[in-house]
Image (tube, helix red, strand yellow):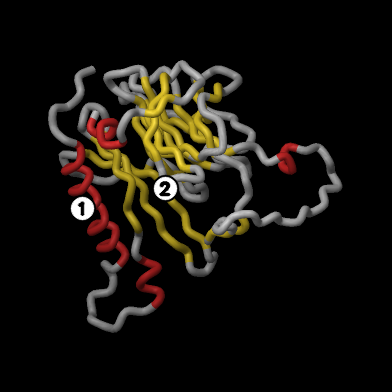
Amino acid sequence: MKTPKFSNLPICIAALIVFSLVFIKQGFAQEQTKRPLTVDDFFKIKSVSNPRVSPEGEWVAFTVTETDLEKDKSETRVWMIPTAGGEAIPMTAKGNSASSPRWSPDGKYLSFLASRNEGKTQVWALNRNGGEAQQITSVKQGVGGYSWSPDGSRLLLSIKDADPDDISDDKEKKPKPWVIDRLQFKRDNVGYLNDLKTHLYTYVPGDEDVKQVTSGNFNESQAAGSLTENLSRFQATGQTTPTVTAIPTSGSYRRKTPTREKLLCN
């Protein structure tokens, strides 16, 4: 399948503007008279983000987040809309948040992250020909991020190390004291920080296990496969400044590139 010759960036920017105006307009359509803004008005504003253009360039998938003041929680759903214009179509139902929409390289599947049935966050996929979303991964501690390999045969997953307390069979778990040995020991919406790191794994849909490809005292994120090389590139953070790194997708070792600028321009 040939890659569209136009840039996706202008489409994504335009799509965000149009989608935002559409959903804001829907929220205020019934209020024509001028009056001061209230707290309830802010909760009617829906946040549109994460646009992704399909491989053939005919559709844009995106997320819409809205907040329920009474329930004191927010919910994110995946939508898609034709790039030529038309009605937006909800791809995920209410009641279960979904995020990070991604198209498979052949455009057959629209995947996303979701936590369903009180389970951990996993990768799910919708067949564009119809049917219910199918769970792709079954990682015990859940998936933090993912991307498709260029040929669509594998997924590159970001997975946080398993917490020994979570996988223990001990039914009488006792809380342990927090040991603070670094400057940043707490974060908003997270709480106290532990020493568990996030590493990269590859997964072939249908296999039972994932394959770990990075390790060490680093957190790896923003991973993406290379279209011209059999490499995966990602950002690694540890005790030093963030660095961009490349590894063979079939390997299990880290190879640093000479300069960050050269890597980002490839």
Residue with the mark numbered 1: 18
Q: Can you give x and y, in whole percent of width and height, for residue 139 in the image?
A: 60, 31
SS at mark 1?
Answer: helix
Q: Can you give x and y, in whole percent of width and height, for residue 111 in the image?
A: 41, 33
Is residue 22 in view?
A: yes
Image quadrant holding the N terminus, namely: top left
| Comes first in the chain, label 1 or label 2 | 1
| Position of residue 106 in the picture relative to residue 65 (left or right) | left
Residue with the mark numbered 2: 77
Which residue is at 57% across, 40% downward? 197
Q: Amino acid at mark 1?
A: Val
Query: Could you say which quadrant of the image residue 7 lies in?
Result: top left
Which residue is at 59% across, 30% downward? 138
| Position of residue 239 in the picture relative to residue 52 (left or right) | right
Relative height, residue 12 to residue 129 (above, below): below
Q: Amino acid at mark 2?
A: Arg
Which residue is more in the foreground, 209 or 262?
Answer: 262
Badge number at residue 61: none
